Each structure stands twice: as structure tokens, then as C-alpha cells.
Image (cartoon, rainbow, N blue to C red):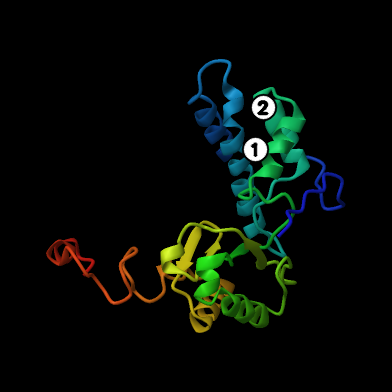
Amino acid sequence: MKKVFDLDADYQPEIFEFNDKFKTSVKEIIARYPEGKQQSAVMPLLDLVQRQVAEEGAKSTPVYGGWVSRAAMDHVAKVLDMHKVKVYEVASFYSMYNTAPVGKYLVQFCSTTPCWLRGSEGIIKATTEHLGIGVGETTVDGKFSLMEVECLGACVNAPMVQINDDYYEDLTADSMTQILDRLSEDLKPTIGSQTGRKASMPCSGTTCLKEQAKKAGVA
């Protein structure tokens, strides 16, 4: 899915500043880098922007999720004393940064080969039908946005989705809609495998190191 990156869009706010809570984190992050290398903090600062916006959005009506505006990129550039275009390049390149408004819960579907073989198309269909929106769209209440992405690295527990910071794995159409229902009520679903699978063991259970698995409580 092509990433939206429009610096002159109507939804772009005029100003952004870190609030007092996040200013403390900004100082801590910059202090991790040697003198003269503060620009290396650009990625974690963009992540802080997204998290601050998400916190503000959760208290708004309608709600919205975390994203990085042009004003925020300009502010990060000022804080780190770097050219604005350098910040734009980072924000537009990495898929972890949302450069356009998104819903409170950003549902990212993996549909590359392992997830596709395990039924990701059915997961996408169940979600779009349940929410009444398509991929790339946001619900009217601002709670959900849908996005199709490349491999998220949990292939062994396919099909899976990432929602905000959490992975939901071993999905079926039913378990996916149950997750959406809980999130719609702002309740926390069980993260990870939805079948009770421990880590990345076979679906049938442990096949080796069984005694060690029992001692670790994963058998």
C-alpha cells in the first residue's frame, strides 16, 4: 500500500510542540548520543511525536491515532538542528511513521506469502465487513484505520496482524472480529497467539526438549 505523504494537505496542523511530559523524554534521548551527533535521535523523536499525538487523540472527539505532521517534523528538525528535508526523508521512508491521520487503532494486515497461505485474505475480508470500511480507510468514529503492509516477522504464527504496538497471531475470522469488538469498547484483547500456542512451537505442541518445555511452563 502506498504511503500517504502530503505536506500541504488541509489536515496538516499549523504548530506542534512536545508537551512537558515528552520534553523530559526528548532530553533523555538526545543525551544518549555523543556531542555533535544529536541528529541520530531523529527516529526516536519522531516516535515520541507519534505517541504524544496518540495520547492527545485518545481524549478527543472523534478520537484519532498517532501520526507525524509536517509541523511536528519541522519541530524535530529545530530541536536537533538539522535540515527539515532530512527529517522528511526519514519520516516518509519508514513505514512505522504515519504521515497522515489514522484511527485510534491502526490495524496493519500482513498479506505476504506465509500469511496469505494461512488465510490472510479471510482475515482482511472479515475485518472490512465487520467495520464497514476498506483497506486504507478509517471508520467515521475515528477508532479504526486499516492498512496492508509487508511482512511483520511473525510468519510461524500466521495469519497475524499488528494493531498499534501489539501482535495478534494464529487468527481466524471469528477471533479477529472478537478482537475488534473488544477494542471498540476500549478493552484490551489478549495479545499474541489466539489459540494459546506458546511462542513459536508447533500447533501440535512440543516435539523435542519436552522435559525442558515442561519446566519452563510452555508445554
The answer to whether 127 appears left or right of 11 in the picture is left
Between residue 57 and residue 160, name the one nearer to us: 160
The answer to whether 181 appears left or right of 134 in the picture is left
- Inspect this view and state whether residue 16 appears: no
Q: Which residue: 75% across, 72% down?
A: 140
- Is label 1 in a helix, a strand or a loop? loop
Q: Which mark is residue 206?
A: none
Q: Are marks 2 and 1 in contact (CB under 8 Å)?
A: yes
Q: Is residue 146 above or below residue 39?
A: below
Circle 2 packing at 10 Å, graded few (<14), some (14-19), many (20+), is: some
Q: Which residue: 50% across, 67% down?
A: 114
* Residue 162 point in image, percent of width and height: 54, 62
Name the amino acid, label 1: Phe
Q: Which mark is residue 18?
A: 1
Q: Which residue: 48% across, 26% down?
A: 32
Between residue 124 and residue 27, name the one nearer to us: 124
Q: Is residue 55 above or below residue 176?
A: above
Quarter of the image for residue 202 reads bottom left
Quarter of the image for residue 8 reads top right
The answer to whether 115 appears left or right of 125 in the picture is left
Name the amino acid, label 2: Val
- Is label 2 in a helix, a strand or a loop? helix
Quarter of the image for residue 72 reads top right
* Residue 115 point in image, percent of width and height: 52, 69
Residue that mark 2 sits on: 79
